[in-house]
Amino acid sequence: MNKFPDFTLAGVIPAAILPFEEDLAIDGAAYRKHLRDLAGVHGIAAVTINAHATEVASCSFEEQRAVLDLSADEIGDSVPLIHGVYADGSLEAARIARMAAAGGAAALLVFPPNPYILGKNLEMVLTHFRHIAEATDLPLIAFQYPLAGGQGYPLDFLLKLIEEVPTIRAIKDWCNLVPQHEKHIRVLQSLPRPVTVLSTHSAWLLSSLVLGCNGLLSGMGSVAADLQLALFQAVKAGDLRRAQAINDRLHPLAEAFYADPFVDMHNRMKEALVALGRIPRATVRPPLVKLGAAEIARIRAALTKAEVRPEGAVLPAAA
């Protein structure tokens, strides 16, 4: 039974992080609190789990099911859950999809299969999505990577994929090129069956949103979902002055989180949540490594500059 029949895969969707104990086991209590923090941001559209922000690459199938069970139990009646499908093999992807559907997920975020990087054969991607779509009728979000990295999909292929797999209802757009991003927005959201473009360009979110995205899906939302929501609402309302003011607060966080090496973005978000008193520790699973003291200090300074305090962000008054 669909608990959220009006959910349209649009709006502001934070991606949850996954706290760990010192022994690298999942910290269920801390994760539940984090979920409550996210679901408590009035106006968010959904919460994404078992994706990059939750270090899904280092989580087993059983752990992903445990994360889904915890999420459904804690916030599943409050907001829709979007479940990642991260697997190199299409049979395993279909297995994850069935598990997510049975566990109450409202939609699936489908990552590109890594063999595609080596093969550059778009039929592999189409086969992957078909297997997932045959396993469940849940709406799918295609994760669009940068073309330069070898995992992105050319627009012509995206259109073919959308035509042949009609349960694709959105893309999470990380193409990282402004002209390509704008093309996605103009073309996909204007199709006879519109496909929502969810921006994940959190390093330049204001610039992305003003192009007309109908939503955003972001790991940075694990720290600043309220600010991202306020920015999205200001842009939709055409209130440029307010949008610029909110963006000025988000900017130091984006600079801190998305610095090189880029792979440490979610490590940094965990350190921010520790500084804010929202999770007890910033443990990450290998091959990720603990950040150094100097970088942690930079993250704390960015939180201060952004006026995000341990008691929570204080948004600027409405104009």
Image (spheres, helix red, strand yellow):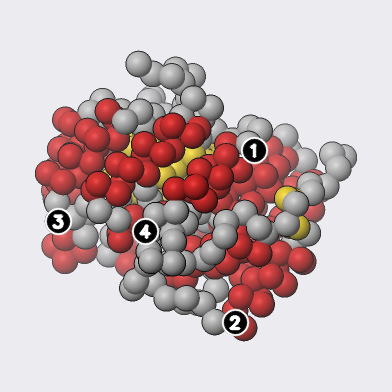
**Image coords of residue 249 (percent x, y):** 74, 58
**Above or below, 303 relative to 13:** below
* 142 and 55: which is toward the camera: 55
What residue sits right under mark 1 in the picture?
A: 41
Q: Mark 2 and mark 1 in contact (Cβ < 8 Å)? A: no
Q: Secondary structure at mark 3?
A: loop
Foreground disc of the pair 1, 2: 2
At 56% from the left and 51% from the top, the residue drawn is 222
Foreground disc of the pair 1, 4: 4
Q: Is residue 176 left or right of residue 112?
A: right
**Image coords of residue 244 (percent x, y):** 76, 53
At 75% from the left and 52% from the top, the residue drawn is 311
* 144 and 274: which is toward the camera: 274
Q: Amino acid at mark 2?
A: Ala
Label whose residue precedes the other's in the sequence (4 or 2): 4
Could you say which disc has been placed on residue 112 in the image?
A: none
Label whose residue precedes the other's in the sequence (2 or 3): 3
